[in-house]
Amino acid sequence: QVALVQSGAEVKKPGASVKLSCKASGYSFTSYFLHWVRQAPGQGLEWMGRMNPGPGDTIYAQKFQGRVTLTRDTSTTTVYMELSSLTSEDTAVYYCARTSFKDSFDVWGQGTMVTVSS
Amino acid sequence: DIQMTQSPSSLSASVGDRVTITCRASQGIRNDLGWYQQKPGKAPKRLIYATSSLQSGVPSRFSGSGSGTEFTLTISSLQPEDFATYYCLQYNSFPWTFGQGTKVEI
């Protein structure tokens, strides 16, 4: 069955970087886009960016431009999200989610909690 | 960026009630609108895509309608398992944006 499995919770200090993973299984990895969405505690959902795993091209939200990098490893069907220069405002649950072309998120990972604290 | 204004932000309802949630887009998004349900500690779950298409496995009491800039999610008869937070999502243009959410409470 289709699944996105994310890496475990992280605790980071302000100014550090974090790199999260999202492993896809049960479908053709290069046939779907993978996105990252985050949710601060008690807050709504915020789209961060998208990876096209085939060619490896990316689109980022302007808010995160320069701080976020999406990469992928087609051999392990895994997408990575690295966020740098962390502040307490980056404390959130980070989700990866799948879409096909011109469609919305149909499959989500379980989420990864990132806590930024000194 | 396209702003999605969702209302109400919360509502109280009883089992069996008909519930309507609205999202207004700041510009036309054709029918590129989805609805998600989220329960505490869980990832969002898609209910509706392309404005009115029901996700496989989702009960038929959920329905979506609208076009252009005004969209609606309707729950025809609220069930106990429907108490959750609901979000709309526009995926017409980047950056994709969500509504602020509607918490449906007893």
Image (cartoon, rainbow, N blue to C red):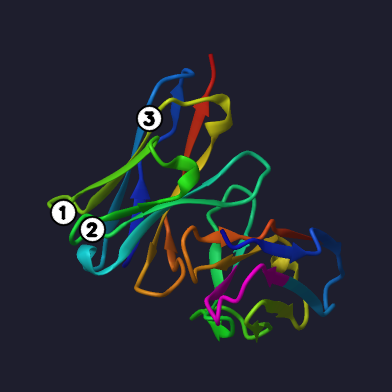
* Label annotation for residue A53: 2
Give yes or no for contact between labels 1 and 2 (Cβ–Cβ under 8 Å).
Answer: yes
Q: Check residue B28 for magenta coloring.
A: yes
Residue A97 position (above or below residue A90): below
Q: Report x, y in % for residue A77.
A: 21, 54
On the question of residue A110 being in view, the answer is: no
**Does residue B95 appear left or right of residue A43 in this picture?**
left
Give yes or no for contact between labels 3 and 2 (Cβ–Cβ under 8 Å).
Answer: no
Give yes or no for contact between labels 3 and 1 (Cβ–Cβ under 8 Å).
Answer: no
Which quadrant of the structure image shows residue A54?
bottom left
Q: Report x, y in % for residue A17.
A: 38, 26
Residue bounds of the magenta highlight: B23-35
Q: Residues within 10 Å of mark 2 (few under 14, many from 20)?
A: many
Judge by depth and name the residue closer to the eye, A70 or A96.
Answer: A70
Element under label 1?
loop
Q: Check residue A3 for magenta coloring.
A: no
| Discs 3, 2: same chain | yes
Measured in 3D between alpha carbons, the distance from the residue under mark 3 to the one under mark 1, in whole angstroms, is 21 Å
Disc 1 target residue = A74
Label 1 marks a residue whose chain is A
* Label annotation for residue A18: 3
The kind of residue on which mark 2 rests is Pro
Q: Report x, y in % for residue A47.
A: 50, 53
Label 2 marks a residue whose chain is A
